[in-house]
Image (spheres, rainbow, N blue to C red):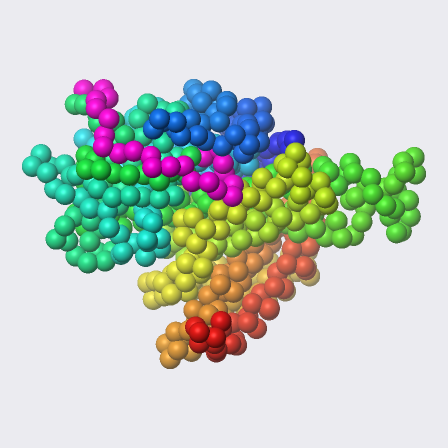
Amino acid sequence: MPTYTAPIQDMNFVLHEVLKVSESNIPGYDELESDLTNAVLEEAGKIASDVLAPLNAVGDTEGCRLENGVVYTPTGFKEAFEQLKEGGWTALDCDPEYGGQGMPYILGTAVGEIFVSSNMAFNMYAGLTHGAYSAIHAHGTDEQKQTYLPKMVSCDWTGTMNLTEPHCGTDLGLMRTKAEPQDDGSYKITGQKIFISAGDHDMSENIIHLVLAKIPGGPEGVKGISLFIVPKFIVNEDGSLGDRNSLSVGKIEEKMGIHGNSTCVMDYDGATGYLLGDMHKGMRAMFTMMNEARLGVGLQGYAQAAVAYENALAYAKDRLQGRDVTGTKNPDGPADPLIVHPDIRRNLMDQKSFVEGARAFVLWGSSLIDQGHKLNDKDAEGLVSLMIPVIKGFLTDKGFENAVNAQQVYGGHGYIEEWGMSQFARDARITMIYEGANGVQALDLVGRKLATDGGKHVMAFFEMVKAFLKENAEHPALKDDFIPQLKQASKDLQAAGMFFMQNGMKNPNDALSGSYDFMHMFGHVCLGLMWARMAKAAHDALEGGASNKEFYTAKIATGRYYMARQLPATRLHLARIETGGDPVMALDAEEF
């Protein structure tokens, strides 16, 4: 069975030596001294290793079951959820006014990686509640906030998001769920929603569903969508729970992975709902939390790769297979360990360089979200909004790929369920699909985000890269193995953007056919920038006489690997983009 140990040293390195969080002017960051973050991450690591990770295979094997209208979670989940609540983990970065601890979002993100790596399906119950909490916090009335948020912060009540319907996924304008106004100001919600993660379960007293629906007589398409709070149990004026609402679970979906999370078909039969935010502005309310939600899914992608890599590395060091071609490394044994072989090293270095680069990328993105929220910094909000489709799309594609790579290290054992590696790949697979399939993320990036505010934010990104390159052109650790590579990759990305500008208006297919390659190209440039920053921080630590030299030298060597072996992919993506739309659109639909 796989094990999990939280990468606390690496997280602290990114927080304190790369991002230098405690020196930031973002409110609350001055509290993020290394002693505090280390203590929080260590405690999170303990519950992850001791409680959550052992339940990961249990959840995968047992799944959830629906009996007489009640959804039951796997053995041990309910008790673990109580431990999570008692430890205050669900309230870490929530508003103190409603019982939260008020810590910065970046710390919640770091803790989130630990919990996702140890048990992704379990963590989704609290994660979805946080998303619903954020929507109510941003758009709810004072009464709604007081009614729902304290219980959601503590996770005594959990939350869901209800968007998708059987006939409409991404195209929400086709939605059929109706909301009929009532004399008392409430609405009667009728319709069916599918793919509702944590739609029902036995771990909380109430479930607060946020449901997208159309009020009759409203505008057509997405402009006529409103968002509603639809509780499983009606909440009385005194805060106690009243009657069961007119909603039910039609079935639990049979899925490829995340079996421990109850993905439900939800049926609303005149259920009582309350408008959240403005009428016909439901999409705006939903998109308030999209940056956090999609960053969280990008995190899931690399977090599954991280735990898979941890176990693959241990296996490669332990498993004896063949002899090193340069000379025996284990003379007392019948064979050398797998890790001596160059192709195993290549595989492990692919994984290591991705995971550590992705971690820095997501934590940097989290700091931009904090900067936007806490300082009302519109430039930070614009920059992170540009990055979100890259974080979500690129990191989940590569996260799945590297979870499969970790499985490959095991050979035949990787395909056998008792070793647990297939679960990481199966669980990671959904991240490429939900919260906007990755093709949609690429279209969002190229079709919307690049042009936002007249292209201001993508130009700011290029200027940031340019400034780093100029500032560190002669840096002893960077000038040969990082700066030239990052400069070329950035030029490739700019050339792709120029191609879109010159050709996209005349033929939109020339831009959209290259959008997926552009998303991956952008992801590589971002990870290249992260690795250059990390290499600089590691070099500074070594120059300062750091005691743990092995950690820092390994960090620089891993960065060199990424720059040499992964970052050149930008040239391939550019070559594809510059072929335009003709090769992609050459066949008529009937010719496929």
445 drawn magenta: no
Question: In this orientation, which residue lies closer to the viewer: 145 or 23?
Answer: 145
Q: Who's the residue at 24% across and 35% down the image?
A: 230
The percent coordinates of residue 10 (x first, y second) are 60, 39
Please identify the quarter of the rendering in which residue 263 is found: top left
The percent coordinates of residue 74 (x first, y second) are 48, 27
Q: Who's the residue at 40% across and 48% down the image?
A: 435
Quadrant where the N terminus sits is: top right
Please identify the quarter of the rendering in which residue 574 is found: bottom right
In the rendered structure, which segment of residues is drawn in magenta?
238-261
The percent coordinates of residue 247 (x first, y second) are 26, 34
From this view, report whether residue 537 is shown above or below residue 247: below
Q: Is residue 142 left or right of residue 383?
A: left
249 drawn magenta: yes
Q: Who's the residue at 27% across and 56% down the image?
A: 174
From this view, report whether residue 4 is shown above or below residue 477: above
From this view, report whether residue 573 is shown above or below residue 197: below
Question: In this orientation, which residue lies closer to the viewer: 465 or 11?
Answer: 11
